[in-house]
Image: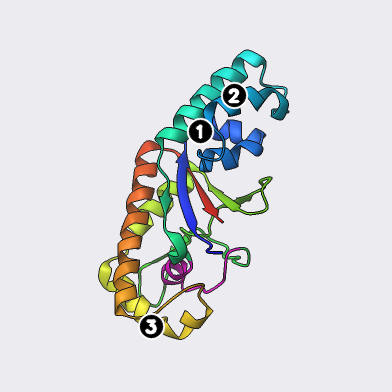
Amino acid sequence: MAISLSFKYVSDDIWDFLSKEPFWIEHYLFPYLVSDSDLMSCSGVIMTNHEFNDEKLEETLQRFIKERNLIEELDIDKSWHSLHLVLTKDASSWGKCSLPYITKLDEEDGYPLVNAVMGGQEIKVYSGDISVHYLNPDEVKVVSSQLSLIEDSCFLERYRSLEGKSGEIYSSSWDIGACDDLMDTFGEVSNYYEKASNRDVSMLLCLG
């Protein structure tokens, strides 16, 4: 089964709701799993946090449903591991990546190393089929600003220099055509982070 990565930003009030009851995270990321009406009807059974009375829960769920349906995620399919390698020079896979930074300067090429694909806090979810990381608004802003500093020439040079590690990368071909596609994906990810940064929101990274 293909393992793909998607990004989806989330507002502070909805994240406050999701963080209190992880069941809802999967349904925020994948609106097609359960209909809006079914979510509302099962909310009283599933919601265990007593801070939410019935009226507040219904109001919050209405905002949750509106936001989950309006915000489109960015799906980069199977290119996540290749992109992570170019952005960090680290070939670790998801779950094994232990980089101690969101971003830092690469002393070799003078450009930022940016943990935009596997960074953030791991979030517990009920489904064993997905893995989720969370970046807060400040982290999103840092990632966005540092991604904007990586020029095409830097990306291309890193790609070429990392060919020796390409055998460690999930579902990857390492040639000039693949590089062009990966640069396009990098542009999409940068633009998505910029949108999230401008909206002062958090980011969810979901592998599954």
Q: In this orientation, which residue lies closer to the viewer: 75 or 124?
A: 75
Quarter of the image with the C terminus in it:
bottom right
Q: Quadrant of residue 97?
A: bottom right
The residue that disc 3 covers is 161
Tag 2's secondary structure?
A: helix
**Residue type highlighted by circle 1:** Asp
- Residue 126: x and y, percent? 69, 45
Q: Is there CB contact under 8 Å for labels 3 and 2?
A: no
The residue that disc 1 covers is 12
- Residue 38: x and y, percent? 59, 28
Left or right of 152, for residue 58: right
Q: Earlier in the sequence, mark 2 or mark 1?
A: 1
Tag 3's secondary structure?
A: helix
**Residue type highlighted by circle 3:** Ser
Quarter of the image with the N terminus in it:
bottom right
Left or right of 52, for residue 151: left
Q: Which residues are magenta?
A: 81-94
Disc 3 versus disc 2: distance between alpha carbons? 52 Å
Tag 1's secondary structure?
A: helix
Q: Quadrant of residue 54?
A: top right
Q: Is residue 88 magenta?
A: yes
Mark whose residue sits in front, 2 or 1 = 2
Disc 2 versus disc 1: distance between alpha carbons? 21 Å
Residue found at x 40% / y 42%: 72
Q: Residues within 10 Å of mark 1 (few under 14, many from 20)?
A: some
Residue found at x 38% / y 83%: 161
The extreme bottom residue here reads 164
**Residue type highlighted by circle 2:** Met
| Disc number placed over residue 40 in the picture, else none | 2
